[in-house]
Amino acid sequence: MPAIRNARRILHHLILLLFSAAMAFPFYWMATSALKTNDEIWQFPPTLWPTSPQWGNYLEAWLEAPFWRYLTNSIVVAAVIVVLQAINSAMMAYALTHMRFRMKKAFTAIIMLGYMIPSTAVYLPSYMILAKLNLLDSYAGLILSNCVSVFSIFLIRQAFLQVSHELVEAGQIDGASHLRILGSILVPVARSSFVVLALITFIDHYNNYFWPMLITKNPDLQLVSAGLRSFFVEGGAYGLKWPLIMAASSFTIAPLLVLFLFAQNTIMKSFNMSAGASKG
Amino acid sequence: MTPDMAKEWKALLFTLPAMIPLIIFWIIPLGTIFYLSFTDWDFMSPVKTFVGLDNYLYLFDNPAFYQSLRVTLLFCLGSVIPVMIGGLGLALLLNRSLKGAAWYRTLMFSPWVTPTVAVSIVWSWILEPKVGLANTVLRWFGLDGVGWLQDTKWALAGVLIVTIWKLIGWTMVFYIVALQNVPRELLQAGDLDGAGSWSKLRHITLPLISPTTLFLFIVQTISALQAYDQINVLTQGGPAGSTRTLLYMYYQSAFESFDIGQASSVAVVLVLTCMLLSLVSFAISSKTVHYTS
């Protein structure tokens, strides 16, 4: 009965099409609301496409708050955190998988404990520690407090476990140092895990809001989410300038959507890995 | 130095770059939060007086705590269950070799990548009561619009819509991976026995992907307990505490009323809940490895 089969296939596509359209619609609505005049955006019923698109709104929003600085801040901070996490996760994972030492059990326990702690619930004492170290309101504080991730350690450890001990021992007999073995044997094998680490960590920290907002008060140091939020509350005056707020949201979201389009296969493939990593 | 000692030191050197920040920013705070919950500190005074269990007794006697507990429970179940059922449903629809599957997947996954603050701002426009899209759609169907973020009855639902929209694609991708690992022979055997698609789903697929279901349930619950960004942008815990989760209550008593002891006792409740959930997930994943490997 090919007719019934065809009907089912069309229905199947129709459901998926409807769902994907609904999921993506907020992005469309954001980008087109940004093009409306203040009068049009308050018009009922709303228009699907602006009657005369105000492309200048994007420029106006861009100039109204230092978004260039917010974006740079976020990208730089996230990138530095990625590099630090890649380094310390690689070293830690190497020690856990290919070195023998007495403290290994204790360290593994500490890492497991770290995995179980909900980070948001300990923001208060972390804040006090940063205050004691005189690192509040600084990138040093923001970066140091984010420079380790148990998830990243698990991810790299999982990859290093695939490398045989014989290979590492052969390197040691040849007189190569640990750092050299790590750099020339293990890191190349785990390259795809490092790419995943970089992408996930970058997305996480570009999007980060709560912790950076708590510890930085200086507007010059604000990351993009906090900057956008203060534009929403102050500059946008809670809804008096919706088109500008939508324009600002658009260029906050755009870098990530572009990154996602280019890297989506890696990000999706990482799910196999991260499920394994979270299981320790 | 003996060669053994040298070996120990070298290993230590490799672990320190991760170990030091882990101890300073995770382990010490964990101990501190327990300690603070037994004091009456106010953020300013130099002394922290030990008050025993007073903070906990006060907390368990405080109606605001129970309201918050209820909101937290509703928020967790109200986000996790729809996200998981929806994610599984979408994964089942996408699992077959379907033309355009990659496109659908991309569109449905994209919200997960974007900053919660930015998309929550966009949603607060969509949920705007007078001319917002959500109420416009309701009016097409002849219904009255509601005060999504202003009405105590609807505010939590508004926050949940945004949360579910953001996370559904994430669980979908996990389920797609899990479904791909279901052995084809088993499903074909089901076909031979004349099982319909519903009974194959119930008796073959669902049991086989149950480790993924448990894993997702726990991970999602832990992250729901820690949700902050969307609540901060959309409702700030209001109106009248109707979206004030435990985490939000903790944050408000710490950084707005500076009642550190009280805040810490709320944080301890959160910490213990999350740790318990993590322990359950460890126990489960060590029992169910035979499914996944």
Image (tube, coloured by chain):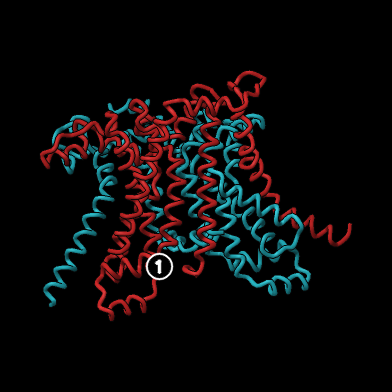
Chain colours: A cyan, B red
Residue B147, compared with residue B165, is above or below; it is above
Q: Position of residue A87 (x, y in %)?
A: 63, 54
Q: Quadrant of residue A67?
A: top left
SS state under label 1: helix
**What residue lies at 54% left-to-right and 51% top-to-bottom?**
B279
Residue marked by disc 1: B208
Residue B261, compared with residue A118, is above or below; it is above
**Category of crowding for the residue at label 1, using alpha-carbon neighbours closer than 10 angstroms: few (below 14), some (14–19), many (at least 20):** some
User: Which amino acid type corresponds to the residue marked 1 in the rendered image?
Assistant: Leu
Residue B5, compared with residue A242, is above or below; it is below
**What residue lies at 28% left-to-right and 50% top-to-bottom?**
A24
**What residue lies at 40% left-to-right and 55% top-to-bottom?**
A260
Q: Position of residue B17 (x, y in %)?
A: 68, 49
Q: In this view of the protein, can residue B46 be seen by the observer? A: yes
- Which of the pair B125/A48 is nearer the observer? B125
Quadrant, the N terminus of chain B: bottom right
Query: Going by the picture, which residue comes out furthest to the top?
Result: B45
Q: Position of residue A258 (x, y in %)?
A: 38, 52
Q: Position of residue B274 (x, y in %)?
A: 51, 44
Instruction: Identify the chain of the residue marked 1, using the numbered disc in the image.
Output: B
Q: In this view of the protein, can residue A58 be seen by the observer? A: no
- Which of the pair A220/B239 is nearer the observer? B239
**What residue lies at 41% left-to-right and 70% top-to-bottom?**
B181
- Which of the pair B9/A24 is nearer the observer? B9
Does residue B13 appear left or right of residue A72 in this picture?
right
